[in-house]
Image: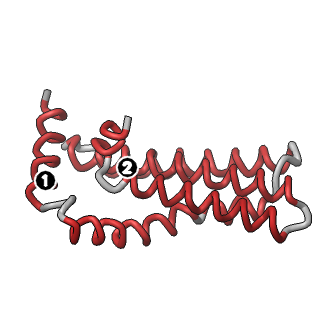
Amino acid sequence: MLKRIRDINEALPGMLLIECMYLAIGEIIIFAVIPEKRMCAVGLLAGVIYAMFSSIHLSLTIRKVVYGGGHRTQMTLVLGYMVRFLVMICVLALLFILKAGDLLCAVIGMFSMKIAAYMCPVLNRRKSTKGENSPDAIDQADKNIIEKESE
């Protein structure tokens, strides 16, 4: 499973890990500090799940644009953006209509994607100093992706 995620985007496993850590830390803070625990916890969970979906969907969209080589790249990007936006609106609407979670906490959970995007280069830098992420391995991964797309 990890290999399939890494095939989509080399940075995606790190981003998903950071988003999970963000969720765990956020839930600990909620249960320690916030009086309305259930509403905030569900809202944060919904936001982080959306952020994970959004990270995977964005990676798939970028991969399709970069390696697809089609003439509809701009349309693919716009449709991808619209899908993510509509899913976000649906998540927020469901939380509001069902009174299942706090909307502000859901938005805070959605920011986990941004936090992960900024933290991922730091993790990759640490990996490269340990020798796990050599440039030759990255070049080979790109060649493998191109070969899979051409089949």
**What residue sits 32% from the left and 36% below the top?**
4
Residue 146, image quadrant: top left
Q: Which residue is mark 1?
A: 137
Left or right of 125 in this view: 83: right
125 relative to 15, above or below: below
**What residue sits 84% from the left and 47% below the top?**
100
**Residue nearer the viewer, 117 or 66:** 117
Q: Amino acid at mark 1?
A: Ala
Which residue is situated farthest in the top direction here? 151
Q: How many marks?
A: 2
Residue 150, image quadrant: top left
Question: Are the residues tagged 2 and 1 within 8 Å (C-beta)?
Answer: no
Residue 132: x and y in percent read 21, 59
Q: Secondary structure at mark 1?
A: helix
**What residue sits 44% from the left and 57% below the top?**
15
Q: How is the image coloured?
A: secondary structure
